[in-house]
Amino acid sequence: MALIDDTKRILADLVAFPTVSADSNLELIAYAADRLGACGATIKIMRDESGQKANLFATIGPDRDGGVVLCGHTDVVPAEEQDWFSDPFTAREADGRIYGRGTCDMKGFVAAAMAVAPHFSRQQLVRPVHIALTYDEEVGCLGARRLSEELEQMAFAPVIAIVGEPTGMRPVEGHKGCFEYTTVFTGLKGHGSQPDAGVNAVEYAIRYAARLIKLAERLKSNPADPRFAPPWTTLQLGRVDGGIARNVIAGHCILEWEMRPLRAQDAADVRSDLDAYCETVLLPAMRAVYPGASIETEIIGEVRGLEPIDDSEALRLVAGLTGAADAELVSFGTEAGLYQALGMSTVVCGPGSISEAHKPDEFVEIAQLQACLDMLTGLSRKLSEDKDA
């Protein structure tokens, strides 16, 4: 069976698992464990505290340091509120593409890695290859954070990570961080005819949001690397939810927002400014009317970016396998910074275009899957021939 045909079959199976981040991924993990175990991989499964999500870490080759990790997440964004041409959880092949939720982001890469796994197992690998599948990347890289803790305790440390997010099979050496927050405002309900007798949580959330917008404009004046688009740290308001009626003072409001920092100092400055604004301006005004008023910010995830590194072993490896002349920087976030923080040389490279991710009728081109297979089969030869990969 040709590898591309096997990849398409596996991808169809993966798409059929509706692994939206809010739901369990255990059936997909069991499927992957069966396939990878059947070709001789050593399998480790790590469940989250709920028992409904799990990571998988598979190893093919010798038990030794120096391995290469192929990293992919199993969760996908929701599809039910989008207008799809066909069932988003049934893979559909047409016009040289495979359509379906997650085909691009990022089950295409996972399918390719699983298809090549038997090929890895038939080689006399000098260094091991690992396949890491994680949960909840789309909601804060929760699975990768758990996996990072496990990797620190493992007896044999990998040295290279290839994160297969969609890059058009072009190696990416750097991206911004992704910091996600939920800020909750608690005020005092009341009748709309007496606004001074209550504390309107929606009003204070809007003032907080205005501060975020002001900070976002300020960050534009401090660009960093011009290869990023845009070349500065960004702030983005995602969702505001508060109040029950026009004539009721809102006692509760939730503001969801994110920051994509280019520099660690930018993130620290934003948080410091917001803390000071709440403590010196918003909270005193709220508590002058209602002492129990509060503003609480929950950190959903603070996932560091991928920092470009001179003389990157991972970049040299992937550039050699793909024939890429140079590397790129992107603004979207991945799990790569977490693996880099463990000391692994890390690069992002996978099939598909990020412009198709999260959209209705998401797709990956079959030619992109083939290019990914070429990279992975080349990696198997490299790991068999060269202890320095």
Image (spheres, helix red, strand yellow):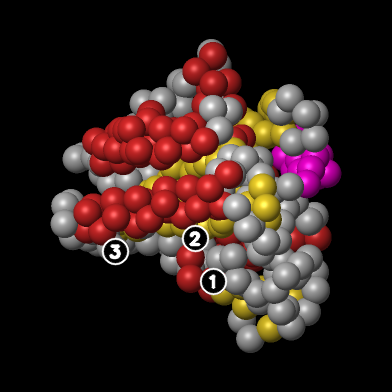
Residue 325 in view, yes or no? yes
Q: Residue at x 80, y 60 (%)?
A: 16
Helix, strand or loop for disc 2: loop
Residue 25, horizontal then vertical, whole percent:
76, 43
- Label 1 belongs to which residue? 356
Residue type, label 1: Glu
Residue type, label 3: Ala
Number of the front mark, 2 or 1: 1
Residue 15, horizontal then vertical, whole percent:
74, 61
Q: Residue at x 73, y 47 (%)?
A: 22
Helix, strand or loop for disc 1: helix
- Label 2 belongs to which residue? 166
Q: Is residue 381 left or right of residue 357?
A: left
Along the viewing direction, whichever of 130 and 339 lies nearer the viewer: 339
Give the residues in magenta: 23-38
User: Is residue 364 part of the magenta span, yes or no?
Assistant: no
Label 2, label 1: how far apart the Cα atoms are: 9 Å
- Label 3 belongs to which residue? 229
Instruction: Give the numbered dot on residue 86.
Output: none
Number of the front mark, 1 or 3: 3
